[in-house]
Image (spheres, rainbow, N blue to C red):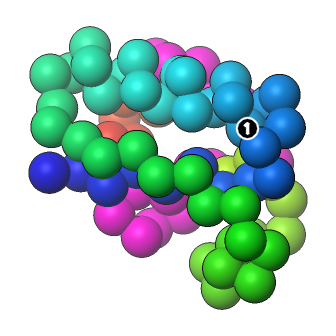
Amino acid sequence: MVRIQILGSGCAKCRQLADNAEAAAKELGLEYELVKVTDLKEIMSFGVMLTPALAVDGQVKSAGKVPSVELIKPMLG
């Protein structure tokens, strides 16, 4: 199972990133868990200074932008 973490305050961009990541996982047919991390200390523990950020299995794959579904797919593999 892939653990997808959305790091951010819950803003519109964070929600869009969550939607895109979920769509990418579904299109790839992955078993996944989507977790929204909103605690600032926890976000900083990832070394992320810009949100929204996307982490896959604890590894930050993107920060400070909202990649498209097509760009997220290879990050999940």
Residue 50: horizontal and vertical position, in percent?
A: 85, 59
Residue 15 picture quarter = top right
**The C terminus - image quarter:** top left
Q: Residue at the location (23% across, 50% down)?
A: 2
Residue 32: horizontal and vertical position, in percent?
A: 24, 42
Which residue is label 1 attached to?
14
Q: Residue at the location (71% across, 61% down)?
A: 38
Residue range of the region highlighted in magenta in the rendering: 54-70
Q: Is residue 5 magenta?
A: no
Residue 27: horizontal and vertical position, in percent?
A: 26, 14
Q: Describe the element under mark 1 as helix, strand or loop.
A: helix
Taking the image as shown, residue 73 lies to the left or right of residue 19, namely: left
Please say if 18 is above or below 77.
above
Residue 10: horizontal and vertical position, in percent?
A: 77, 43
Please say if 29 is above or below 31.
above
Please say if 33 is above or below 15.
below
Q: Residues within 10 Å of mark 1 (few under 14, many from 20)?
A: many
Q: Nearer the viewer, residue 49 or 11?
A: 11
Q: Residue at the location (61% across, 61% down)?
A: 37
Q: Residue at the location (81% across, 52% down)?
A: 9
Residue 3 visible in image: yes
Residue 61 visible in image: no
Residue 31 picture quarter = top left
Q: Is residue 56 magenta?
A: yes
Total tally of numbered discs in the picture: 1
Taking the image as shown, residue 1 lies to the left or right of residue 34, namely: left
Q: Give, as a three-letter code, the residue at label 1.
A: Cys
Residue 49 picture quarter = bottom right
